[in-house]
Image (cartoon, rainbow, N blue to C red):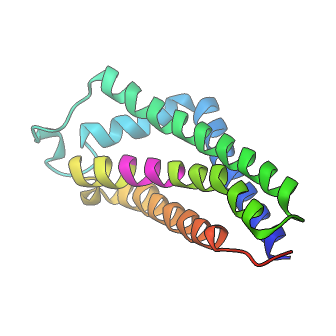
Amino acid sequence: MLRIIKIVLVISVGAWALVGAFGNVIGWEATIGAVGATTSMATFEGGADDWRATENPALILAGAVFILALKIIAGVLCLAGAWRMVNTRSGDAAAFHKAKALALTGCAVAMFMLFMGWIVIAETWFEAWRSDLLREQALQSAFRYCGMIGVIALFVGMRDEEA
C-alpha cells in the first residue's frame, strides 16, 4: 500500500507542475507580469529606484521561460518516474527504489525552480520580501509548494521493504 501512496504522491507533483505550466501558457501575460513586477521592484516603496530594478524585456522573458520550462521538465520527469514505479510496484525493493530516480529528479527540478526562482532571485536579489503583494501571493506559495514537494520527495525516497 505504501508503494501505491508514493506513486500517487509523485503523480500529484507531476500534475501540479503540468497544470501550473498550462496556466502559465494560457495566462502568458500574467506570467510575464508577475516576473516583470518582481524584476521592476515597483511593488514596494523605493524599489523601482534601486540599481537592481529592471524592466528589461529579455530578462523578464528569460525568467518566465525558466519557470515554464522547469515546470514542464519537472512534470514530465515525475510522471515518467511514476510510470516506472507502477511497473515495478510488485517487484523487489531494489527495483522499486531504482524506479524512483526519475520521480525524485522531477521533484528536485521543481524544488530548484521554486527555490532558485522565487527565493534566491525574487526574494533575495529583487527584494520581493519587501512587497506586500509579492510576499503574500508569490513567495509564500513558492515556499509552501517547495516544502510540500520536499516532504513528498523525502517520503518517496525512503527505502521500501519487500512487496
Quarter of the image for the N terminus: give it: bottom right
- Identify the image quadrant of residue 7: bottom right
Q: Position of residue 156 (x, y in %)?
A: 66, 68
Q: Is residue 110 above or below residue 91?
A: above
Q: Is residue 133 highlighted in magenta?
A: no
Q: Position of residue 148 (x, y in %)?
A: 57, 68
Whether residue 63 sits left or right of residue 42 in the image: it is right
Label the magenta part by its dominant secondary structure.
helix
- Identify the image quadrant of residue 152: bottom right
Whether residue 35 sits left or right of residue 53 in the image: it is right
Q: Is residue 97 above or below residue 69?
A: below
Decide which of 99, 68 is in the foreground and name it.
Answer: 99
Quarter of the image for the C terminus: give it: bottom right
Decide which of 133, 75 is in the foreground and name it.
Answer: 75
- Identify the residue at horizontal 11%, vertical 39% (top origin): 49
Q: Is residue 161 above or below residue 8?
A: below
Q: Is residue 115 highlighted in magenta?
A: yes
- Identify the residue at horizontal 90%, vertical 65% (top origin): 90
Whether residue 161 sits left or right of residue 115 in the image: it is right
- Identify the image quadrant of residue 25: top right
Read off the magenta span. Answer: 110-117
Q: Position of residue 42 (x, y in %)?
A: 25, 42
